Image (cartoon, rainbow, N blue to C red):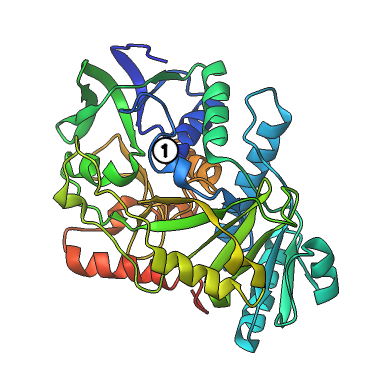
Amino acid sequence: MNNNQEHAEIVVIGGGAVGCAVAYSLAKAGKTNVLLLEKEPTVAAVTTPQAAGLVGQVRNTVERTKLAMWSVKTFSQLERDEHPKPGWRQVGSLRIALCDERVAEFHRMKAVADQSGLEVEFIDQQTAQRKWPAMDFHRAKAILWCPSDGYLQPSDLTMSYVAHARKLGVRFQTSSAVRRVVVKDDRVTGVETEGGTIQCDMVVNAAGAHAYHIARGVGLELPIVPVRHEYFVTVHAAGMQPDLPVVRIPDSTLYLRAEINSLLCGGWERASLSTDPREFPLDGTPPGIESDWDVLGWFAEQLAPEMPAVEQMGIRSVFKGWPTFTPDGRFIVGESSRVKGFVMAGGCNAHGVSGSAGIGRHVVESVLDPDPSPYVKSLSPDRFDQSWAWNSAQKEAMHYYETYYDLGH
């Protein structure tokens, strides 16, 4: 994949799902001189392959709903095109409410979906049972069904972006670690790598857990906080098949889906674990993550009322990573007013895979549209001035993670 270049109009740093989606989106928008740099030997090598791949469109705001809808539209198009495909399975999703307050929230979410043009409906327990026979829905007070939701394989999605972007002229250079972004007179002029300096007019920072370091290197201090997230996949389990809907049980902080003939189950921890990017360098790696069996066991306990058999299922594998979160729970997307040509695509709040196509679209809008929407403008890195404190920002980002499924979130 190596393709050494000395000049590019736009350099994208980071070969995860977000970086590759941004490169693809820029190419679709007509930018033909785009180069993506990835320090690992392959793309999708760090956080992306640890993602569960769930794609849900039901959100609390019209803007977030439409972003997710755009991602689904993109995944569907990629799945219809030639290989490689993103492994997109549009199996639908079930969202289960276990309390009256959650029922009221579901009605508000349906109103947002209706306003956004997203098809959702309430279904009864019997209908849900037919969609997922191995689950017990007797505790469900409301069930919201979205037929166009689904899941995909994160690494397959990334390779699909790469293949389609290459057809449009994007170049990919792997095993190419970035040392720094070169800035002159408050404007990006290039990217220094181990193999030399690449001249460019614009840099898109999609470096995941290292996005903090890339931004700091040009004088921008941004609260991009890596927070641990993990889930487990069981051994072969009766009743599991890949066409089952995705299930979310927010009152139990859980999500689950079939993984071939196994169960994939994860959730949002009540006592999160984060790491400080200031404690590892740009050319280093975040701390290793040990499987937290207490947390994984708690996920299984939470699921047991709806699926008693889960406590007897053996665990085949555990996936974990450091997705990045922000204090306000919103992406950091757009060009900095302090460093012209420096564009952020980070702080994805565990939506880097599912929201990748939408994030790519937002990046395009932020840099190519003369009048971006108020929502896209609100994602700008400029919203974080120099007055914020790291300790409080880290606590707020962790709190956002811990309360992800809380009412009113």
Question: Where is residue 7 drawn, in percent x and y?
Answer: 31, 14
In this figure, which residue is indicated by the disc labeled 1? 367
- Compared across the picture, whether 350 is left or right of 39 comes to right
- Compared across the picture, whether 224 is left or right of 87 comes to left
| Label 1: few (<14), some (14–19) or many (≥20) C-alpha neighbours in 10 Å | some
Type of amino acid at the residue the image marks with label 1: Val
Question: Where is residue 299 drawn, in percent x and y?
Answer: 50, 69
Question: Where is residue 276 drawn, in percent x and y?
Answer: 21, 56
Image vertical order of residue 165 relative to residue 304, above or below = above
Q: Which residue is outermost to the bottom?
A: 100
- Residue 205 visible here: yes
Q: Using the image as rendered, state which of residue 95 and residue 370 is in the foreground.
A: 95
- Residue 389 visible here: no
What residue is shown at x 27% (from left), y 70% (from top)? 395
What residue is shown at x 67% (from left), y 74% (from top)? 306
Q: Quadrant of residue 284?
A: top left
Image vertical order of residue 40 relative to residue 119, above or below = above
What residue is shown at x 69% (from left), y 72% (from top)? 111
Image vertical order of residue 50 relative to residue 147, above or below = above
Question: Where is residue 115 drawn, in percent x and y?
Answer: 69, 65
